[in-house]
Image (tube, rainbow, N blue to C red):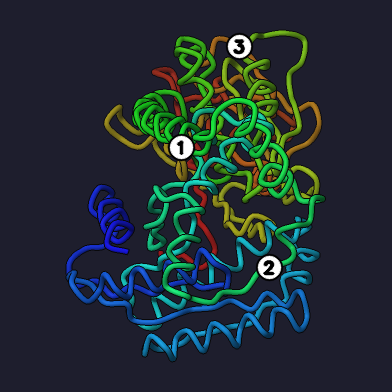
Amino acid sequence: MQGILDRVLQTIRRHSLIPPSARVLVAVSGGSDSVALAHLLHRLSKTEEFKVSGIIHLHHGLRGEAADEDSKATRVLADDLQVPYHETRVDVRAMARERGNSIEEAGRAARIAFFEETAKRVGADRVAVGHHQDDQAETFLLRILRGAGTRGLSSIYPRHGVIIRPLLELSKRALRDFLDAESIKFRNDETNNDLTIPRNRIRHQLLPYLRENFTQGISAVLAREAHVARQDADWLDDAADQASARVVETRENVVTLDARELLALPPALAWRVVRRALGTLARERFISLDHVEAVMGLTAFGNKRSVSLPGQRAEMVNGSVHLEPADVVMTAEPVEFSYMLSVPGEVLVEESGRRIKATLGKVPDRSGLCNRSELVAVDAERMVGPMTVRGRRPGDRLRPLGSPGKRSLQDLFVDRKVSRASRDQVPIVTDSDGRIVWIVGLTVAHQFRVTERTQSVIFLESKKLGVEE
């Protein structure tokens, strides 16, 4: 028995899984792996500087009476080890229906939430789970079959947040030998034999075939491959962090990628930068290599200018890829408004939550205020009054201040990273001839700018409703 205890302790120390004086909860399902984990950590706590502060169990609301028996057995284990017991019940099947994912995915999400919440509630530092070397090999093969990259092939990490895996370098056979030698009872989960589940087919069909026809040590080989992939992925992710600072900009609900900078990156980094950017708006939806390649395809400046992606839409505009939430694109309703603005005078634009004010004034000197986002000066003599404050309309175009030519309002919004959800609420000031004078918060039209020949000006001011003077 001492041999297996030493190997668990080596894993704990090698990966710094349990700090001194830590309180550790052990997640137990009732099966062999988690039961072995509970006994091994409990025995190690007698000689090491950590404490097993409880057994925790999640009842998934599946498997009927069998699950109830698992719960009873786990409670008995906690009593035998003389540690507190914590249990909660979740209807995983209903959870999967609500989220639109599989029972396996819903169960995993429920477990993580339960582990983290319980640890916080009882003041525990770590939650230990029973994943072992064979689980690592299964996950590696499963990720290969699903087309994972280097990060995916890293498979199961020794630690993720408060969750630790002290058995990750032990085989299932070693754990079963320990339980048999100590006459420790455990329960069998019959769902582990369900071959409709991909992981079970790998466990009962693929891995046995590889052991028989290639090498008995296949689990250890694949676990080492996962370790190498994890080291590579960690280094590449650090490099991608630095690259993202040059390539990606996030503002409100818009994520922008500079296409030129992106294309200059090595493919391994570009792939990570794009995947990370897509993850910002994906809202837990899965991002695949196909999605990343779709975005990279936009940067090739082909005929395709936009693509739909999980939770978002990507659009190529003026040398940049713009990502915006799909629900905003699909559900935003146009907001139409139009108000007459006299000079002097003011109007309340409730649709945008602003008050727009116009006053006559003297020409400011060059150090004065001429063009800020909320207060601008325009040449009064170039305008035909009265003015109108309205929302955007199809075909709106103007020459932005300092721009060499006219641009569509749509392109200006995209370039200035105005989210789709906000565009219909942006006030636009026009003169009586319908010419755009000011896009509030963005730019004055070049033809109404204040020049050395300007004799009088109109100050246009925008203030958010509810903001004190």
Say what secondary structure mark 2 lies in.
Answer: loop
Q: Closer to the observer: label 3 or label 2?
A: 2
Give neighbour class at mark 1: few <14, some 14-19, many 20+ (Cα, 10 Å): some
Q: Closer to the observer: label 3 or label 1?
A: 1
> Can you say whether 391 is above or below 186 in the image?
above
Q: Say the numbered circle drawn on residue 106.
A: none
Residue 391 spot, x, y in % from top left: 72, 44
**Which callout, 2 or 1, points at the residue further toward the start of the chain?**
2
Please name whichever residue, 334 or 124, is drawn nearer the observer in this view of the structure.
124
Q: Is residue 116 visible in this depiction of the protein?
A: yes
Q: Residue at x 31, y 35 (%)?
A: 368
Residue 265 spot, x, y in % from top left: 45, 13
Please name whichever residue, 38 or 414, is drawn nearer the observer in this view of the structure.
38
State the image quarter where residue 429 is shown: top right
Q: What is the tally of numbered marks visible in this picture? A: 3
**Which callout, 3 or 1, points at the residue further toward the start of the chain?**
1
- Mark 1 sits on what residue? 220
Q: CA distance from mark 2 to mark 1?
A: 25 Å
* Residue 15 left/right relative to 241: left
Q: Say the numbered circle drawn on residue 405.
A: 3
State the image quarter where residue 455 is shown: top left
Tell me if label 2 and label 1 are in contact, CB under 8 Å: no
> Can you say whether 255 is above or below 325 in the image?
above
- Mark 2 sits on what residue? 189
